[in-house]
Amino acid sequence: MSNGLARASVRFRPSAFVGSFVALLFAVVVMTACGTLLQTGLTAHLAPVRYAHTPVVVAADQSVRIEVQHGKEPEQVAEALPDRARLDTALATRIAAEPGVAAALPDLAFPVEPAQGSNLPPLTGRDFSAAAITVPGAPGGPAGDVLAQGSAPQAGQVVLDAATARAAHLAPGDTVELTGPAGAGAFRVSGIAQQQAADGTAAGTGSGTGTAWFADAEAGRLSGHPGQADAIAVLPRAGVSTEALAAQVRQAVGSSAEVSTGDARGAVEQPQLAGGKEALTGLGGSFGGIAAMTAVFVVMGTLSLAVGQRAREFAMLRAIGATPRQIRRTIATEAMLVAPLAGALGVLPGLGLAHWWLGQLVQRGAVPAGVSLDVGWLPIVGSIAVGLLSALGAGYAAARRPAKARPSQALGDAATARVRTGPVRTVLGVLALAGTVVLGVLSSTMSGTSAANTALGVVMAGMTGVALLGPLVARASASVLGLPLRGRAAGAPGALAAANSRANARRLASALVPIVMVTAFCSILLFLQSTITHVSSQQVRTGVVADQVIGSTGAGLPADTAARAASTPGVAAAVGVLRSGALYESAGALGSATVLGVSGDPAQLPHVLDLDVRTGSLDRVGSGTVALDATLADTLGLKVGDRAPLWLGDGTKVDPLVVATYGNGLGLGQVLMGRAELVGHVSSGFDSQVLVADAPGGDSAAVGHALAGLGIPGATVTDRAGYAGQADKDLALSSWANTVMAAVLGGFAAVATANTLVMTVLDRRREVAMLRLAGTTRRQVRRMIRWEALLVSSAGLLIGGVLAAIGLIPIAQGVTGSAPYVPPATAAALVGGTLALGLAATALPARSLLRSRPVEAGSGRG
């Protein structure tokens, strides 16, 4: 009987299930996209290109790993390094001693800038001993195997790839001026490499540019990493399998390096894959969790509303003898009929959304090109299962009351609107709201990232409490916000809207919860990013006091740029800025910080940078010392005189002495150290900028002209706005990611809200008919429904805004050290969009109801 009733309901009353179907469909779309991104992040790999003919590659671990105690078992936490970790080339000698090894070739890559005005493109510099890696069959043979013309490079010489030499009209014997991160000079072209050997996508660069091979010692000197290699390519003797070779190499290197075979070699070529995987897993996991939570609440709310609207139907079934079990089975069967269909139709759009998302991340450089979407069954099945279980749970919960009612009371209960929630739901809701208050107070007493992490729990707890106590919250909101509607300004339609909203609080709650969700989550995502951007930009504007900023259109500025600028007439001070990153441990997790390595005398810093020093002095920044942003120091619990445990960009563990804390770290850099201490631990030793202060009374335009005439490759000279532009560019990816999250989540919640409002309006056919029979005009009915839409939208905005504020204030304080910044235009768009959505979603169904004559509508037909 139950199965037949369910099929008949879906077949003959499809309009009753459209709302549930739409909610389930969009929930599966969002969860499938997030789950697929998560799976892609876990399984992402890249096929090797440079190492395609090298079966075994040895490289350093490109992440920092720590052990954190969770319960009885320790858990390993890892974080990708900001820069490249390298190996000692002496390791190649140990590897080459193994019996199955034919050759172990250290491979080093670094950016090279041609002279200003040269017709050469930016190049990737390499050590010539590894030139044979990309030539099939050549590795292990004589160096001449890779040369089409000329000879191997000696000191002061270079070999160019064939395509680059041809484009620049160069031949053996010509001279070119080239600049590496740690040196420059005029080099004679000693040879031209074979076309197939010209590969610039290898370890450390991934640039795909032309290649310049130097003598091994010179390559180390120019790169700034003498005696080090990005990786070691290991080639087998005849008859030695890859497995046997890898086993011998692992025995030789022990735990000092990682041995890669197969597609793992691609990750050695492009170490940014590790960061890309973290971006995908973080996006798919964190946002997927929020999306799943939102989907569960929305689906359960929509299904509960759909079942509640059919209370009269279930009451009639109870009155004619249907058992409680049959009622529950009917609801379960309906969910089984609707949820899988909605899930199946939502899979393809979800995969399309994931594909677009991945493409955008690749385009913005967050994920390396070549990573493809991993479409598996687990995210798809998981998304459909979450929707199905949500539908079943909502159906059972909504059917509990009509199923338990005695047949003689069922019709009477169905005719009255119930506001009270069950005891279990009430207790859980009260506990959730109490947890919101406790976590809110706790987060306000914390600082740094701990406050930010705790504040996220505030929003989750608050959302849970609002969802569980929805009818009570809706009734209270209607009572308070309905007061202005009872006055003369709103007239009779306003008074009717206030009374209806209060009496039908359960119906109001179904539309209220999605609005609260979209307001809370979107506010945090959008306004947190606006706060970071605002504070960062403000710190850059006030912190950069240099008169001139030398930037670069290429890989960066040579190491001697600051010294050359300082010797220019009219210059009082010039400070080179080398950008990198560092990792730190806080509360059992690894975090990242931006690092500035500054050259020259620290006493010159105030001429170009105002870091807003809080404690200590920047004069002592140098060997073995560091200055920290005050927020980062607070997060780590450090003060002047303490040691700061950090991992530099290449994974080197250091513990420098803290000699100062400052306030402009978010915009300028969170860790300040001497350039000499940092340069050996970065992928490229090119400076990002050189900040120049003019001499008092000097001609700024003349100084700028003189700096532009220094002949520095790729150099550009601007005012301090050039630094601000670079800093703003670094925030673009984070801003885009948060905006997309808000758009996807907000779009889903908006569809759910509109869907629920349409359902509630269409369910009021009898109510509208009674009002029409009583003499109410169409215009008055439309105004009443319009006021109700504004009331529920305003209530959702108000409650969501309160939850967002409780969570956003500690997060903003912990991340930026300041109060949230809410752009008026963004806030107005969020409020206006929500109100417009509520009005639009009720206007169309209201017009449909009012087309019928009062007598026809009251009969209940259709």
Image (cartoon, grey):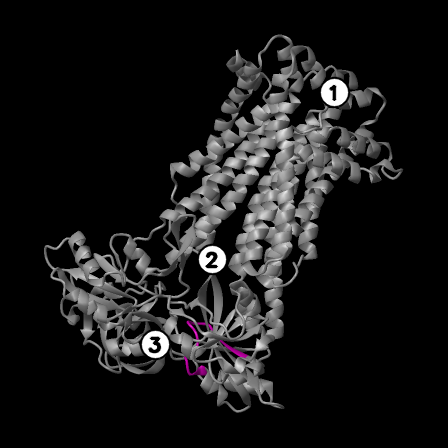
Viewer-side label of 3, 1: 3
Res. 504 visible in picture: yes
Mark in front: 3 vs 2: 3
Q: Nearer the viewer, residue 406 or 152?
A: 406
**Which residue has dot 3 on it?**
224
Between the C-alphas of marks 2 and 1, the distance is 54 Å
Q: Is residue 352 visible?
A: no
Q: In this view, does 658 lie to the left or right of 677?
A: right
Disc 2 vs disc 1: which is toward the camera?
A: 1
Closer to us: 369 or 289? 289
On screen, residue 106 above or below 271 = below
Magenta-colored span: 549-561
Structural crowding at the residue carrying mark 2, measured as other residues with C-alpha within 10 Å and reported as few (<14), some (14–19) or many (≥20): few
Q: Earlier in the sequence, mark 3 or mark 1?
A: 3
Q: How many labels does the image show?
A: 3
- Residue 766's disc is 1
User: In screen coordinates, is 412 left or right of 556?
Assistant: right
Q: In this view, does 62 lie to the left or right of 783?
A: left
The answer to whether 531 is drawn above or below residue 18 in the figure is: below
Q: Residue at the spot x=40%, y=59% of the render?
A: 80
Q: What residue type is labelled 3?
A: Gly
Across and down, in percent, residue 546 comes to 57, 80
Between 548 and 438, which is closer to the camera in this rendering?
438
Q: What element carries label 3?
A: loop
As drawn, 774 above or below 321: below
Please name the residue that numbered disc 2 is placed on: 364
Measured Cα–Cα span from mark 3 to mark 1 = 81 Å
Q: Do the residues labelled 3 and 2 touch (CB within 8 Å)?
A: no
